[in-house]
Amino acid sequence: MTNQQHCDIAIVGAGAVGLAAALSLAAAGRQVVLFGQASAPRDGRTVALLDGSWRLLEALGLTETLDAVAAPLAVMRMVDDTGSLFRQPPVEFKAAELGLPAFGWNIENTALVEAMAAKAVAEPRIRMIPQAVTEITAGVDSVRLAGDGFTPVAARLVVGADGRKSRVREAAGITARDWSYPQVALTAILSHRREHQDASTEFHTRSGPCTLVPMSGRRSSLVWLLEPGEAERIAGLDDAAFAREVERRTHSILGALTVAGPRGRVPMGGLSVDRFGAARMALIGEAAHVFPPIGAQGLNLGLRDVAALRDAVAGADDPGADAALAAYDRSRQADVRLRTGAVDALNRTLLTDLLPADLMRGAGLLALSRIAPLRRLVMRQGLAGGTAAG
């Protein structure tokens, strides 16, 4: 057999979730090998890091760096812009109702990954291998990872942070169900005339949400879900015409808009798995769950995966043992399924003009606007990963 190196835990995928896993597990005393290029595309995408995720990053010593480029989310506003007969007034969720200064902080993906990668490079318990893993072979006591440009690595636990088309998930024999939506998300960074006042506004339209999320200064990030043909048309516009389309769609809530950063286009889909670990392999992030960008849940759910995995292997002599994987699976089943189902249901009700769906959505928004205890409960559930830092 080819010579190979041994490690406690290997992580495949060096995006934000993979880097967070490497840093968290190293901070817990594990020796970690991280495979992949630590980079994020410059396509205008940002992430709203909710309170629990921010505290996880704070525990890893990252927030001092991120403070300079992150913007607080003090208000989350939902506007029914579907034209429904049951249209309700806007609903505002205010962090102050929960005694918090903000629900979280919004930051550009590239800035987040760069800060995490710099931290990982400086961590002696993390060995970074920028090459891709192309062969994964499960064994009784370890999993062998091989590829071009590096000596094969045998790890007692392999963590799949390698996205929707995960090689780790395939090697573990974990079944995934995936689906697509008749939507494409357009992303961009925009500057605007008016102050955003630390408020995120999500317009619910018949093609899906159109959301403006505050960034530092008079800037906001855009995530706009559209029918593919319309997305193609708008994506083809020059920056000035594109900004005018966004301003029209968002009812000039922030005044005149100007494109102030990169733009992107992302087809929308979903994915779920029947279990989160098997055969000395565990799945985190989009290797385990994918859904549309509604309610700032995507990366936050991935960071809760990281915290749960860290806790599941804490104190275990063998981090890839069946007991550790079973504990991790139990900890993720309810949280992931609840949020995947909720986001999927809301997105699908926006895509239909059936009266019962409109009635249910309208009644829900009305209840949230009128019943303060219910609104606070929903806010707490949205932030339920508040234990991510331990």
Image (cartoon, rainbow, N blue to C red):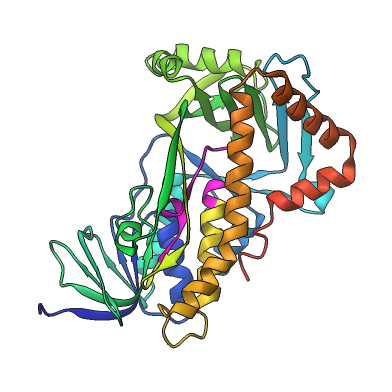
Residue 264 in view (yes/no): yes
- Residue 193, how many percent across, how many down? 62, 21
- Residue 355, how many percent across, how many down? 72, 18
Residue 299 placement, left or right of 251: left
Q: Is residue 386 placed above or below 176 in the rendered structure?
A: below
Residue 6 placement, left or right of 339: left
Residue, x 60% and y 40% (percent of image)? 343
Residue, x 65% and y 25% (percent of image)? 203
Residue 64 in view (yes/no): no
| Residue farthest left in this picture | 1
- Residue 122, how many percent across, how many down? 37, 70
Q: Quadrant of the N terminus?
A: bottom left
Instruction: Report the front residue among 68 and 346.
Output: 346
Tell whether position 72 is magenta: no
Tell whether position 290 is magenta: yes
Q: Quadrant of the C terminus?
A: bottom right
Number of numbered markers: 0
Instruction: Report the front residue among 319 and 222.
Output: 319
Q: Is residue 257 placed above or below 150 in the rendered structure?
A: above
Residue 205 placement, left or right of 363: left
Q: Quadrant of residue 135?
A: bottom left
Magenta region, residue range: 282-299
- Residue 189, how many percent across, how many down? 49, 30
Q: Is residue 157 placed above or below 68 in the rendered structure?
A: below
Q: Quadrant of residue 348?
A: top right
